[in-house]
Amino acid sequence: MGIDALDGRLITLLDQEPRVGVLEASRRLGVARGTVQARLDRLQATGVVRGFGPQVDPAALGYPVTAFATLEIRQGQGPDVRAHLATVPEVLELHTTTGEGDMLCRLVARSNADLQRVIDRVVGFAGIVRASTAIVMENPVPLRIIPLVEQAAQDG
Amino acid sequence: MGIDALDGRLITLLDQEPRVGVLEASRRLGVARGTVQARLDRLQATGVVRGFGPQVDPAALGYPVTAFATLEIRQGQGPDVRAHLATVPEVLELHTTTGEGDMLCRLVARSNADLQRVIDRVVGFAGIVRASTAIVMENPVPLRIIPLVEQAAQDG
DNA sequence: GCGCCGACTGGACAAGCTGTCCAGCGCAAT
DNA sequence: ATTGCGCTGGACAGCTTGTCCAGTCGGCGC
């Protein structure tokens, strides 16, 4: 259970140039095409690579503002709150957490003013006791996985 | 600057079945192949679709624990802290924010015990004054974009 | 040491897709 | 009415994919 150096190089290559096909990848990596196909199949079968969906930029869609909201939930209202938040398109992800606050969600909005509307909609729900919001100013490290993949490739 | 209904349907289709090629997509959407190619080119040129990189699951790589850390930074140490965090593979993303705390980062670890090692490495840096960590227990809404795409497609 | 097994190689094949043209049409704005 | 733009439907060569196959190599158990 893990990935080896070839898996790592394959994932990194696909990350940098998603357009390359299996044949081109086999040339770049210096292995037979069948090997690349087998590795890719295995990576997807084991769930390491979940898919190759389009990576959409919310900012380009007209939602340049990102924020994180920490929510405090009334006892027993968890399921209701989750269902509520799942219906809000501006909620991009939701986690339940330990520590201060019970949930953490990522929001986007059309502007700082629009963020108020989104937050009102998010917290305008009986089960939510308190919410504190942190607006994202910069994103020095965008969501990435390659460094972790390379570490995992070395370890295993 | 925006997307229309056809763009939305195309993105949704690609999200659900990334394997479909341009030709198959044109059949599914009921338009000419050239149209799909032109739309895809435009979506990528305008940055709405940034790419089709592999979606890697950290859990499948051996990092099943996710956490969010709020960091408080000493005045003027921001750039140094960013550079430091960028070198840690377990830091999957980093944001600078308003509100309590100056930065928010997403971490993964091999176990709860291993998370301690990661946190020590993250906060073991002179510029970081204080850190509070929230461990993710559940992820009721995984990172998603389709609902927002559909809303953007309706708006115009 | 022997034999088995899994993984990789290098190659083959038909089928299908991609990239790239083109002419024609309809709609919207000027 | 005229222009511009996007969509259609079709063509073409070139290449890739999916799927076989036999042969080789190294590790593992016996």
Image (cartoon, coloured by chain):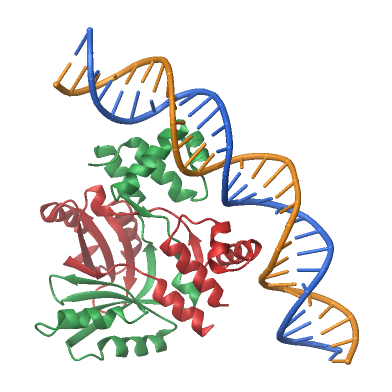
Chain colours: A red, B green, C orange, D blue
Based on the displayed image, in which of its 4 quarters is residue A15 positioned? Answer: bottom left
Of residues D6 and B110, the one drawn nearer to the viewer in this rendering:
D6
- Pick whichever, A127 or A113, lies toward us: A113
Quarter occupied by the C terminus of chain A: bottom right
Say if D7 sits above or below B130 in the image. above
Residue A92 can be seen in this image:
yes
> Where does residue A46 sit, x and y in percent of width and height?
57, 68
Q: Is residue B134 above or below residue A134?
A: below
Q: Quadrant of residue A138 in the image? A: bottom left
- Residue B83: x and y, percent? 24, 80
Q: Is residue B15 above or below residue A136?
A: above
The residue drawn where x is 15% and y is 76% is B102
Please name the residue shown 14% across and 53% down the image: A111
Q: Quadrant of the N terminus of chain A?
A: bottom right
| In the image: residue A17, left or right of residue A100 | right
Return the x and y of residue A50 as percentages of the image width and height: 49, 62
Please identify the quarter of the rendering in which residue B151 is found: top left
Q: Position of residue A47 (x, y in %)?
A: 53, 66
Horizontal arrangement in the rendering, residue B52 relative to residue A64 (left or right): right
* Camera-side residue of C8 and B143: C8
Residue A131, visible in the rendered structure: no
Q: Residue at image x 32%, y 59%?
A: A80
